Image: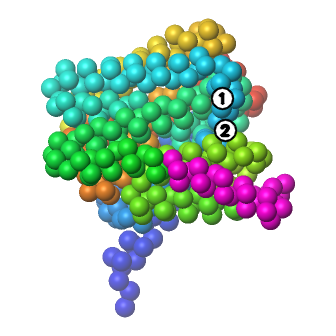
């Protein structure tokens, strides 16, 4: 006899992904919305704490989401040009400035709302980041290219790394405060960061070497890199390291080992598209309306000061780094997406046995808002910067 309850649990995720894909296509064709904004809405509505059509999160889903995020982070890391950053140090200066301004602004706003010191520090550290996953998907969808596009990618990667470093150090501080265990605190922070970076570097050296040994550097290397990314993320997940940092460093190292990947290869084809839908549905499905509502005041304040800090920090260095102040402000506007990064970092931390969900309730408001509107900000910035090919633009630039 068929167990209908188990049947619906088994088919819930495939049906949600199918519906998200359909809604994304309709929204993109009729309203010119970025597809991932629609994916987020479907995930949030179907979440266990809303309509309850999706089952409670399982470790296997977190691993799949991390793999999907890893594919996008690898692509982001692969597109980072260290020589360009060396020849134009003002871009790095802009990244440090906007990340520092964001940290300070969010910390003081959180303190104003009577949050504890540790909560304010954690909120500030996570708010520094942009979500490379969202930015990469929108850039690929719009097929944009140019100075604004490249700077958005580079800045999102850099402030993502800065955020991971700051967050891990603060987590170590919190662990030491609560447990007094110096080893546990060190492992939760600096040791995890170092091992994650070494894992990414090792993969970035080994896989290109393997491809050269098999004489496949000029052929389609997508399969080899896909398998390697799955392995790196799974290993980082199993060893309780940082899959975010490992995948990003993997892509960065692979690029500078002179392995050339075509644009179609970097997106990992249909597998990349499928896992991207799963990722953004999953991210939104982890949010609870009660948390969103509870943190709405501080959450909206964080969104406002974070937006201003990023636009100010990047705009300040726009002219000396080689772009107009207008494009600098557009770059700052496009670095606002944060949801995928924040949720996966928090879920990974909870997987380690350290939960900040209740302390960081305002981030639920930030995550939901930026999951829906963040991709639209990126899309608008690219269009207004005139870096989207004709025919892809959904409206005239101002």
> Residue shown at 48%/62% (left/top)?
235
Magenta stretch: helix, strand or loop mostly: helix
Q: Nearer the N terminus, badge 1 or badge 2?
A: 2
Q: Position of residue 244 (x, y in %)?
A: 48, 47
Q: Position of residue 338 (x, y in %)?
A: 44, 36
Q: Nearer the viewer, residue 262 or 253?
A: 253
Q: Position of residue 345 (x, y in %)?
A: 38, 46
Q: How many marks?
A: 2
Give the magenta-colored segment's residue range: 197-221
Q: Quadrant of residue 324?
A: top right
Label 2: state its secondary structure: loop
Residue corresponding to mark 2: 79
> Residue shown at 30%/54% (left/top)?
350
> Residue shown at 39%/72% (left/top)?
8
Name the quarter where the C terminus is drawn.
top right
> Residue shown at 24%/30% (left/top)?
120
Q: Which mark is residue 150?
A: 1
């Amino acid at each position: 006899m068929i167990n209908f309850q188990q049947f619906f649990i088994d088919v819930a995720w495939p049906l949600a992904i199918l519906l998200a894909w359909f809604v994304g296509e309709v929204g993109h064709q009729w309203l010119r919305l970025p597809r991932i904004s629609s994916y987020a809405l479907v995930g949030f509505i179907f979440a266990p704490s809303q309509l309850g059509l999706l089952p409670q999160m399982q470790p296997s889903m977190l691993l799949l989401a991390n793999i999907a995020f890893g594919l996008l982070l690898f692509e982001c890391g692969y597109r980072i040009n260290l020589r360009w950053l060396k020849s134009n140090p003002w871009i790095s200066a802009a990244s440090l400035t906007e990340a520092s301004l964001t940290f300070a602004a969010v910390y003081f706003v959180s303190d104003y709302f009577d949050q504890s010191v540790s909560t304010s520090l954690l909120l500030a550290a996570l708010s520094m980041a942009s979500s490379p996953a969202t930015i990469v998907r929108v850039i690929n969808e719009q097929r944009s290219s140019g100075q604004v596009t490249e700077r958005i990618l580079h800045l999102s990667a850099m402030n993502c790394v800065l955020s991971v470093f700051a967050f891990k150090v603060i987590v170590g501080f919190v662990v030491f405060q609560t447990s007094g265990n110096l080893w546990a605190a060190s492992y939760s922070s600096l040791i995890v960061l170092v091992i994650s970076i070494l894992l990414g570097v090792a993969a970035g050296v080994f896989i290109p070497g393997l491809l050269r040994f098999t004489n496949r550097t000029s052929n389609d290397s997508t399969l080899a890199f896909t398998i390697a990314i799955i392995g790196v993320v799974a290993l980082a997940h199993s060893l309780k390291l940082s899959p975010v940092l490992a995948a990003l460093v993997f892509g960065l190292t692979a690029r500078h080992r002179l392995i050339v990947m075509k644009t179609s290869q970097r997106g990992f084809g249909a597998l990349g598209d499928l896992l991207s839908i799963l990722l953004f549905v999953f991210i939104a499905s982890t949010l609870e309306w009660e948390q969103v509502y509870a943190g709405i005041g501080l959450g909206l304040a964080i969104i406002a000061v974070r937006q201003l800090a990023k636009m100010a920090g990047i705009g300040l260095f726009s002219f000396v780094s080689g772009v107009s102040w207008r494009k600098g402000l557009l770059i700052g506007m496009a670095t606002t997406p944060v949801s995928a990064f924040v949720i996966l970092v928090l879920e990974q931390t909870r997987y380690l046995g350290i939960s900040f969900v209740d302390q960081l309730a305002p981030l639920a408001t930030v995550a939901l808002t930026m999951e829906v509107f963040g991709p639209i900000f990126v899309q608008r910035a690219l269009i207004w910067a005139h870096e989207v090919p004709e025919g892809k633009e959904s409206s005239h630039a101002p």
